[in-house]
Every structure is written in structure tokens, then in C-alpha cells.
Image (cartoon, helix red, strand yellow):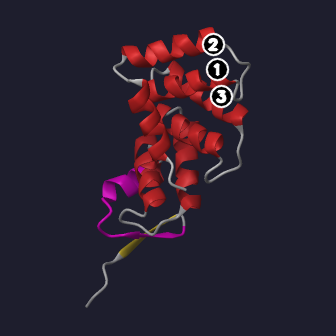
Amino acid sequence: EAKEPRAQMAGAAVEAKEPRAIIEGAVRGNPDAQLRLGKRYEEGNGVAQNQTEALRLYTEAAEQGLADGQYTIGDIYMTGNGSAHDEEKAARLFTKAAKQGLAVAQYALGSCFEYGAGVVQDEEEAVKLYTQAAEQGVSIVSAETTRRTKRRW
């Protein structure tokens, strides 16, 4: 039985069933493609699981201002899963994503303010951020579920 051909991305093998557009977009620096390919590396979905490559791609997407990338890297720093635990860096990244209107980042930043994680504790700011997330239809339960299930490292 013949093996599927592989493409090379940053020295890591990528299965041919991985959509070429995502790979090519990530190589060209498209942040959405970097985030999508990073998620595939994180989960081992169509590629060999590679947490280092996932983190690199997520970071590149975040550095280009992609809110989902900023939230994802912030969550990695907050949990310490896949990187060193750094609450201040996580809160800075959540702030960037929250300012772009990403509801789950608003919720995460609200949690930072509620508990004083990486920021000075401020319950009024926490309520403001939770309200912003809720106004977008995000319940605390759904935001917490998303946050807790997103990281599997």
C-alpha cells in the first residue's frame, strides 16, 4: 500500500490530506491559516502532533494581531500547558484580544481581574468585562467550558 505524499512545513511532515491552502497560507504568513494549522498540530489532526510547531504558529498569528491567536497564546501562558506559566503575559494577550471584541478573551480577562491573576484585582473591571462578553451572547458557563476544553496539553 502506497503512503500518501507529504509536504514539508518548518521541518515537520504534513499529511497530503491537509488542505494545501492552509499550509500555503501559513507559509506566506496568513494569521488565520497559521491559527488553523497550529490547531491541527496541537490536536494531531491530519498532521503528526507537534506542540512546539503549534505554539510557534499560534505565536506568529498572535504577533500579527489576530485576536484568536492572542487569546490562544494567552491561555497557554495562563495554564502553563505547552509553555511557562506567566499570568502577566497572559493578561496582556487577553487584553489585546478583548479590545478587538473577542468575547472569550473578555471573559478570560474578566477572570484575571476577578482573581488578580496577572493584573491588580479589580472586581468592577471584572464585572464590566463579563458584561461585555455576555452582551455578545456568551454565558459564563459557555465561556468557561470553552476555556477549559481548549487546552489539552
- Disc sitting over residue 92 in the figure: 3
- Disc sitting over residue 26 in the figure: none
Q: Is residue 23 left or right of residue 110?
A: left
Which image quadrant: the C terminus?
bottom right
Cα separation, mark 3 vs mark 1, equals: 12 Å
Using the image, determine if residue 86 lies above or below residue 19: above
Residue at figure coordinates x 49%, y 31% from the top left:
67
Secondary structure of the residue carrying tag 2 is: helix
Q: Nearer the viewer, mark 3 or mark 2?
A: 2
Which residue was labeled with disc 2? Answer: 123
Q: Position of residue 53 (x, y in %)?
A: 55, 59
Q: Nearer the viewer, mark 3 or mark 1?
A: 1
Q: Examine the structure image and report whether residue 15 is included in the region drawn in magenta.
A: yes
Residue at figure coordinates x 46%, y 48% from the top left:
34
Magenta segment, which residues?
11-25
Using the image, determine if residue 43 lies above or below residue 67: below
Q: Position of residue 32 (x, y in %)?
A: 41, 42
Using the image, determine if residue 122 lies above or below residue 104: above
Residue at figure coordinates x 55%, y 35% from the top left:
70
Q: Nearer the viewer, residue 72 or 126?
A: 126
| Three-letter residue code for mark 3 | Arg
Which residue was labeled with disc 1? Answer: 113
Secondary structure of the residue carrying tag 3 is: helix
| Three-letter residue code for mark 2 | Glu
Q: Tell me whether circle 2 and circle 1 mark residues in contact (CB < 8 Å).
A: yes
